[in-house]
Image (tube, rainbow, N blue to C red):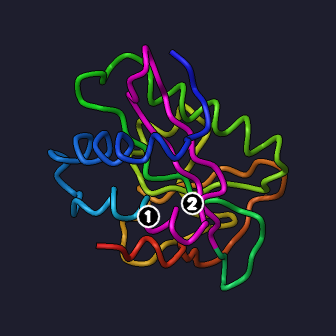
Amino acid sequence: MQIRPETPADIADIRAVTQAAFATVPHSQQTEAAIIDALRAAKAMTLSLVAEQNGEILGHVAFSPVLIDGQDHNWLGLGPVSVHPDHHGKGIGSKLIRTALDQITAMGTNGCVLLGDPAYYARFGFRAAPADGPALVYPGVPAEYFQSLPLNGPALSGIVTYHPGFAAS
């Protein structure tokens, strides 16, 4: 399996993998593929990687800029990340995320946030806001599901705003 940057030839396959990956996710509003399309159209994806094997796209991860208290602090949002259901449990998502985190760290990104399962993302170092320290928050979601990972900078406090592409439907 190869992890590589997306190309224009991958767009339809990324959409199909993303739709399949989120089709049965209980909290999904089935907008993840539209979010990726909107981020791409706005040229707002800082990094977009695919997992490919034998010419087949098995998974995808996207990173886009976020604002903290309305300011750019060189932090990114991870997501959506998707792996085709036929390939779950093979480490594809983990490899995509680890490769991408290494790349954004090397690019000098100060930190990363995401909305997701704490049990899954803890393995990459992501943590929910501590009760007694700097806290990044995303209003309207349970605090334990909004997580951050400082990379090349300190932990920050404030309200996180995602790119408008996340409002895609």
Label 1's element? helix
Residue at mark 1 to residue at mark 2: CA–CA distance: 7 Å
Query: Residue 6 in the image: x percent, y percent?
Result: 55, 41
Residue at the limit of the structure toward the front, as seen here: 9
Label 2's element? loop
Judging depth in this view, the residue of 46 and 98 nearest the camera is 46
Please report whichever mark, 1 or 2, sits nearer to the chain's N-terminal start: 2
Res. 119 image quadrant = top left
Judging depth in this view, the residue of 133 and 163 nearest the camera is 163
Rendered image: mark on residue 10 = none
Residue displayed at 64% across by 64% down: 132
Residue displayed at 75% across by 75% down: 72
Q: What residue is shown with label 1? A: 143
Query: Residue 139 in the image: x percent, y percent?
Result: 44, 78
Q: What residue is shown with label 2? A: 129
**Is 112 rendered above or below residue 83?**
below
Residues drawn in magenta:
38-66
Judging depth in this view, the residue of 39 and 101 nearest the camera is 39
